[in-house]
């Protein structure tokens, strides 16, 4: 009988071990399974990876720090939350990955995100390892003062575990410019050091131009590269986007700039459908609604005539040619993927992390839809974060044009790597396989160089 200690353990036995060692963490198991199924066939004849148990080691984070975050709300009630930092792998550079504040956050969520981040960061070609952090804190409905006190309490513990050459967090769901500002200020106060310990900072204090746009724009550039490779284009296509946060609004913005018609956006309350399509004025209105007024997407339908709001629904049954899930994990299931395919979707580019379930991904593959997984498609954000780190180290600030050009080239480079490792005999590009293998190889080869640790 196969054991996990066998050098040539097979895929089902490997996954049994992952499930057993990570009880109650289905998203982490899902993320490992999605990567491992491709890596197993890639390393089949590569003894060095088996002997060093590389995959088993990558699927075990270097460390997880879990801590209490205690703060006081505006009514002087003492509140207790749980915070984490998952440092997954630093073989090719300091740990790097966002911080998520959302009531649904668990250790398992952050393990899945840190694991994905390891491969994504490797794909960018920049020297960044994989990490992720967060807390089960809900910034929604909190005053600015409450968010500030929470962020300061969170950083009061986190600061011991991070540093510009150790671990460099950034934003994610629920952590935008406001939260990064509060956390960076607290780090600086505690350590008395100004250093590039967080990315996504305001441009007044060391942030990079193009960082807010980078993830959404990058996901559209990746889609553009896929379409170009298949002899097609974004211009003139209908598109649906989910979410209405940082990634979704910037994806919608770039799509409209490139001549696509964006029909939807959403939040956890439902989605809006605008048959006329969004334009820059409408997108700016949504950015203000979400970032300044902290309102709900349903308000769009009250404001713009001709549009409608669909409560508690997701946008995937709206016919379109391009689809960009940009909200959260597992927001697009098998049935919804079938509906998209039946309605003629040509390309799917994931702005969010793991938004499509494993069954949904299979539907896209079976239909030969151009399908880009988040670890490739949304890597533009962390890539520009990597460039923010470089600018901070050099104490300089690059201009918009230069960074825009670098982002375009980085996304082209990631696309090329996916094509190199993901093209099958018939010419169909399996972007999941391409991204998994290209991302794995660099990390695995670095780990081999270090020996057993
Ligand atoms: P954000 O600005 O906080 O926006 C998140 C959006 O997703 C909001 O519209 C939110 O709606 C919606 N959402 C969150 N949880 C949801 C749920 N359970 N069901 C339905 N909608 C939900 O976050 P973001 O930075 O755009 O991140 C979005 C996704 O992109 C995440 O998967 C993140 O990991 C990924 N990502 C982000 C970056 C980046 O640079 N920001 C980089 C790479 C990947 P509500 O307001 O109703 O919660």
Image: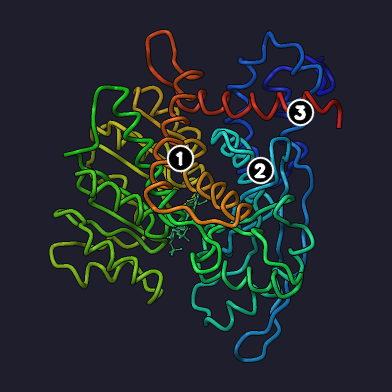
Sequence-wise, which precedes: disc 1 or disc 2?
2
| Quadrant of the snapshot with the C terminus | top right
Q: Which residue is mark 1?
A: 356
Residue in the image at 46% along x and 43% along y: 378
| In front: label 1 or label 2 | 2
Q: Quadrant of residue 431?
A: top left
Q: Which residue is mark 3?
A: 447
Q: Report the Cα–Cα distance between label 1 and label 2.
A: 21 Å
Q: Give the secondary structure at mark 3.
A: helix
Q: Give the secondary structure at mark 1.
A: loop
Using the image as rendered, state which of residue 132 and residue 304 is in the foreground: 132
* Callout 3 touching callout 2 (CB < 8 Å): no
Tell me: 54 left or right of 301: right
* Callout 3 touching callout 1 (CB < 8 Å): no
- 368 is higher (above) or lower (below) than 350: above
Q: Quadrant of residue 368?
A: top left
Sequence-wise, which precedes: disc 3 or disc 2?
2
Residue 321, image x, y percentages: 24, 37
Using the image as rendered, state which of residue 306 and residue 147 is in the foreground: 147
Q: Which residue is mark 2?
A: 130
Count of number-bearing discs: 3
Q: Label 2 CB, ligand 1: below 8 Å? A: no
Residue 165, image x, y percentages: 73, 50
Residue 277, image x, y percentages: 18, 53
Using the image as rendered, state which of residue 139 and residue 18 is in the foreground: 139
Tell me: 268 left or right of 87: left
- Residue farthest to the bottom? 75
- 321 is higher (above) or lower (below) than 452: below
Residue in the image at 71% along x and 23% along y: 445
Q: Report the Cα–Cα distance between label 3 and label 1.
A: 30 Å
Using the image as rendered, state which of residue 131 and residue 346 is in the foreground: 131
Q: Give the secondary structure at mark 2.
A: strand
């Amino acid at each position: 009988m196969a054991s996990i200690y066998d050098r040539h353990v097979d895929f089902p036995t490997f996954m049994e071990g992952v499930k057993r060692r990570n009880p109650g963490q289905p998203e982490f198991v899902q993320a490992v399974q999605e990567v491992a199924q491709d890596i197993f066939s890639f390393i089949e004849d590569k003894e060095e990876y088996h002997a060093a148990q590389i995959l088993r080691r990558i699927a075990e984070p270097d460390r997880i720090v879990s801590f209490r975050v205690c703060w006081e709300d505006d009514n002087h009630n003492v509140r207790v939350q749980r915070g984490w930092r998952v440092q997954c792998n630093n073989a090719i550079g300091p740990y790097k990955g966002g911080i998520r504040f959302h009531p649904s956050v668990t250790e398992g969520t952050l393990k899945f995100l840190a694991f994905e981040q390891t491969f994504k960061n490797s794909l960018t070609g920049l020297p960044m390892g994989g990490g992720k952090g967060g807390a089960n804190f809900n910034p929604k409905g909190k005053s600015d003062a409450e968010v500030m006190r929470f962020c300061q309490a969170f950083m009061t513990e986190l600061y011991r575990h991070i540093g510009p050459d150790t671990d460099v967090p950034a934003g994610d769901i629920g952590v935008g410019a406001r939260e990064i500002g509060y956390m960076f200020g607290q780090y600086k106060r505690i350590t008395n050091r100004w250093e590039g310990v967080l990315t996504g900072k305001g441009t007044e204090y060391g942030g990079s131009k193009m960082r807010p746009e980078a993830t959404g724009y990058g996901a559209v550039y990746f889609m553009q590269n896929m379409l170009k490779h298949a002899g097609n284009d974004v211009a003139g296509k209908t598109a649906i986007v989910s979410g209405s946060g940082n990634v979704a609004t910037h994806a919608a913005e770039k799509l409209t700039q490139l001549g696509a018609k964006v029909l939807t956006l959403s939040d956890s309350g439902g989605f809006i459908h605008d048959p006329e399509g969004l334009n820059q004025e409408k997108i700016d209105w949504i950015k203000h609604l979400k970032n300044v007024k902290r309102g709900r997407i349903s308000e769009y339908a009250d404001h713009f005539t001709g549009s409608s709001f669909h409560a508690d629904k997701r946008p995937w049954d709206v016919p379109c040619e391009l689809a960009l899930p940009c909200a959260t994990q597992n927001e697009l299931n098998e049935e919804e993927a079938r509906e998209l395919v039946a309605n003629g979707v040509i390309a799917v580019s994931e702005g969010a992390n793991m938004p499509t379930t494993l069954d949904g991904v299979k539907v896209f593959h079976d239909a030969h839809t151009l399908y880009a997984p988040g670890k490739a498609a949304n890597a533009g954000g962390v890539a520009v974060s990597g460039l923010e780190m470089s600018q901070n180290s050099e104490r300089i600030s690059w201009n918009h044009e230069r960074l825009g050009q670098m982002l375009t080239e980085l996304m082209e480079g990631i696309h090329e790597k996916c094509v190199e490792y993901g093209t099958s005999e018939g010419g169909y590009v399996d972007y999941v396989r391409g991204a998994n293998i290209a991302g794995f190889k660099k990390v695995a080869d670095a780990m081999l160089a270090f020996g057993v640790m």
